[in-house]
Amino acid sequence: MSFRSVMEPIFARLPAVARPEKQVLFKNKIMWTLAILALYFILSNIPLFGMSAESIDLFAHYRAFFAGATGSLIVLGIGPIVTASIILQLLVGGDIIHLDLSDPRDQSYFQGAQKFLVFFMIILETLPQLFGYIKPDAGLATSLGVETWVVTLFLFIQICIGGVLIMYMDEVVSKWGVGSGISLFIVAGVSQSIVTGLINWLPDSTGYSIGIIPRWIQHISRGDLSLMFSSADNILNYVLIGGGILALIATVIIFAVVVYVESVRIEIPLSHTSVRGARGKFPVKLIYASVLPMILVRALQANIQLVGVLLAGRGITFLGEYSGATPVNGIMYYLSAINSPQDWIPSYVEANYAAMGFAAPEIWQILLHVGVDAFLLVAGGIIFALFWIETTGMGAKQTAKKIYNSGMQVPGFRNNIASIEKYMQRYIPKVTIIGGAFIGLLTLFASLLGTIGGAGGTGLLLTVSIVYRLYEDLASEQLMEMHPMLRSFLGKED
């Protein structure tokens, strides 16, 4: 008896959100999407009962694209879903698991395996955090008359429930709403950070407001601008950190570049096989695989850091030492993500290390750190982009089948799947590689400059691209509701 024959019935019995029996009306899709978004914000504001204030967030640097909220019921965010996707994509892409994702049965098996693995990853990502990082409240345990391990167990149950809720909320959006839950949660979290970074009037450690707009008002009203621009050092400090000018400029640049790049595409001409004169175009965007592979790259880095933190917490520091969840030396320092100018500008790095009580890295070490992050983003962007299009039905073979089944063909080529696939091979893999490398470089640029609200360059990049694609999805859904025949060509299920 094969492993697949044993696991397939188990995968089939996993709880799942039922697919709609008929096409969901556009207004109903919007309602489902908004309802899940509201539930996400509610869950992100429910604190973990029994958690000590001394707890450490292991994924603090990756919150923007893990879409979780520190100390809340959904502290894991989309981490388990993304990690499960990484593992399966690597196994299928490396041909360790033999699956033809154009085959509906294999595709169903892949989806079942992914859901099963998500359940496993929820537990696997929860347990390490409860061993010294998410700490139980000893005072609460005493007042309840129980041992601290009872509170820890209750924390474990809460985190697992939150992880499962996020998984099924993502499934609801994918089947009943617009886009995907993963994308929706990322946009929600990053948008909240940006709005907070713009208008939050609460003071920080310097006494000035956290938000850029109220901070500027305070500087002007107090007459601080002359002091801020009195020397080159003060100007640099104000532009980079104090006034948030660089973050604002970077945010605007990233927004403009992503919107422009999303519109860059190669349009492959098509003609209908039975209707003379009926023509169309199949667009292959420069960012053909979208920016979601960047989530996989950063998630891979986050999971590597998780291993390093856990080892360092047990006194095993051959991979590097940590201050909280921040690697300060060793190989883990080089493998960590760049998130803002404070991670690579020498003067700020020195100040941060002095505050943590560690010796600051040399200039060459900082440059190597940036170089390693650049390599991971570009190489990872290419690899995961190629895996992504194959596992989501966007590869040349799957696209050729969709075009053929819709009654279209490439003018001048034989009307069969093999000919269309051969033509698509000229463009799709090459554009995917170029787009994956480009989005990796753009992510590096965004990460080096930082963004408003500390959302992180990667988070902002993902958000702008996701919102742009969500706009296209909304327009597509409206169009398909008016012209149902388009659904067959676009490969949408009723």
Image: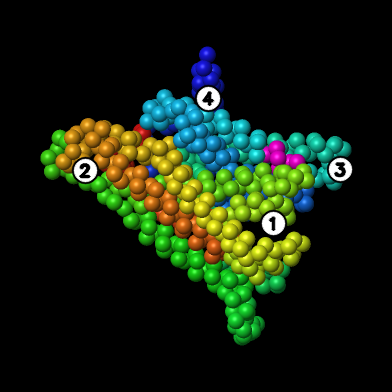
Q: Amino acid at mark 2?
A: Leu
Given the current orientation, which residue lies at the most extreme left position? 276
Question: Mark 2 and mark 4 in contact (Cβ < 8 Å)?
Answer: no
Question: Mark 1 and mark 3 in contact (Cβ < 8 Å)?
Answer: no
Q: Amino acid at mark 4?
A: Phe
How far, Cα to Cα, is label 3 from label 2? 72 Å
Q: Secondary structure at mark 4?
A: helix
Disc 4 target residue: 11
Disc 1 target residue: 328
Residue 94 pos. (x, y %): 47, 34
Point out the frontmost of discs 3 and 2: 2
Q: Earlier in the sequence, mark 4 or mark 2?
A: 4
Disc 2 target residue: 270
Point out the frontmost of discs 3 and 1: 1
- Could you classify mark 2 by the number of other residues whose Cα lies within 10 Å: few (under 14), some (14-19), or many (20 or more)? some
Of residue 103 and residue 188, the one placed in the foreground of this image is 103
Question: Mark 3 and mark 4 in contact (Cβ < 8 Å)?
Answer: no
Quadrant for the C terminus, please: top left
Task: From the viewer's perspective, tell me whether residue 15 is left or right of residue 30.
Answer: right
Q: Secondary structure at mark 1?
A: loop
Point out the frontmost of discs 4 and 1: 1
Q: Amino acid at mark 3?
A: Ser
How far, Cα to Cα, is label 4 from label 2? 39 Å
- Could you classify mark 4 by the number of other residues whose Cα lies within 10 Å: few (under 14), some (14-19), or many (20 or more)? some
How far, Cα to Cα, is label 4 from label 3? 43 Å
Q: Amino acid at mark 1?
A: Val
Task: From the viewer's perspective, tell me whether residue 187 is left or right of residue 210.
Answer: left
